[in-house]
Amino acid sequence: METLGPIGAEIVEVSGDENELIKAVADADAIYGKGRPRISARVIEAGKKLKVVSLGSVGVDSVDVDVATRLGIPVTNVPDTFIEEVADHAMTLILASWRRLVVQDQMVRKGEWTKARPHLYQFPRLMGMTLGFISFGHVARAVAKRAAPFGFQMLAYDPYIEELVMSDYGVQPVGYDELLQRSDIVSMHAPGTKDAHHLMKEQHFRQMKKTALFVNTGRGSTVDEPAMIKALQEGWIAGAGLDVLETEPVGHNNPLLGMDNVILTAHVASASSRFDPARKRRVGAELALVLGGKWPRACVNPMVLEKSKLQRWQPFSMERGPGN
């Protein structure tokens, strides 16, 4: 309301399913989506006065962006707000998975103190290992900064990023197959787009080293989860550190819950004490810009702006760049 109050905007909270949202959006000028219910084609088409859809997240898979684009409605996100938190979490999963932290903790609690050190004798030290990034946006770059002092060799696959950008971070650009075959740890950072859906399938897990680990702080939809489970059960890969899953919340019968070579967190990588205030301020600013006839700072479907009557504005302080 710091930015919406001065323009006389009113927030109406909606609870319920898609049908409730459809009823509520009929007279709305804007939607602030929180992930559920999904802002579907039906919802967007019902908003006859709709000018903008804003999300307080990096990912935009909870919105039918194609329909919004067709109707000339900008969709905004917050691509640069929680980079440091997610990078910290990714690095935590990398280190904890490599040093088998959860298993070590369990050994101590079970009184198996003498087994702990021999357990780690079978794994190499971290220095000199190869870390591969699938997608090299803001988060992956921040992880690369954190990983460099540990002595990693680093690779990245991202057909949308210039090779010189990767080189600036000490990261070697490679093809997808080469990254999977060479990496000791594969870190997934691809967004939940159609192009990235099931980017990791069975054939890709089969290409990885049997000693390799898979870490995902991007989106669960980028991974064929049954294939990953099979890879872990049959030993194609050694383990995984996962903040995101294909179905969330995780079902009680998901085999991942019973695997001691898997570390799971509840899609919390971006969480910190600044999370809610920061994203709400950013969303409020985006909504106020569009409702005031100006371009938003971050628009995931910028082609609609070229055809719109929104005015260009000159930012005085901002971060720009691709998303996750």
Image: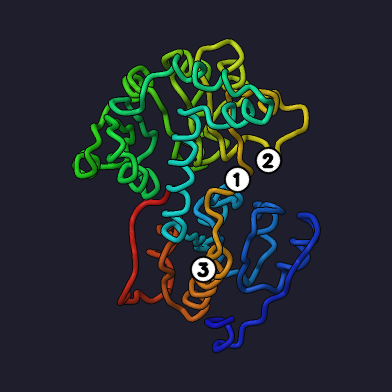
Question: As rendered, which of 239 and 133 lies closer to the eye?
Answer: 239
As drawn, 29 above or below 71: below
Q: Is residue 124 left or right of residue 243?
A: left
Of residue 46 and residue 54, the one placed in the foreground of this image is 54
- Residue placed at 47% from the left, 20% from the top? 120
- The label on residue 248 is 2
In this view, the residue in front, 178 or 213, is 213
| Left or right of 299 on screen, residue 170 | left
| Disc 2 crowd, CA 10 A, few/some/many (<14, 14-19, 20+) | few
Q: Position of residue 295 (x, y in %)?
A: 41, 71
Q: Earlier in the sequence, mark 1 or mark 3?
A: 1
User: In this rendering, is residue 109 above or below 38?
Assistant: above
Whether residues under marks 2 and 3 lie with C-beta atoms below 8 angstroms apart, the answer is no
- Amino acid identity at mark 1: His
Q: Residue at x 37, y 34 (%)?
A: 133
Residue 166 x, y percent position in the rendering: 24, 40
| 130 lies above or below 267 | above
Q: Secondary structure at mark 3?
A: helix
* Direction from residue 285 to residue 127 in the image, left or right: left
Residue that label 1 marks: 267
The secondary structure type at the circle numbered 2 is loop
Kindly identify which residue carries mark 3.
Answer: 278
Q: Are marks 2 and 1 in contact (CB under 8 Å)?
A: yes
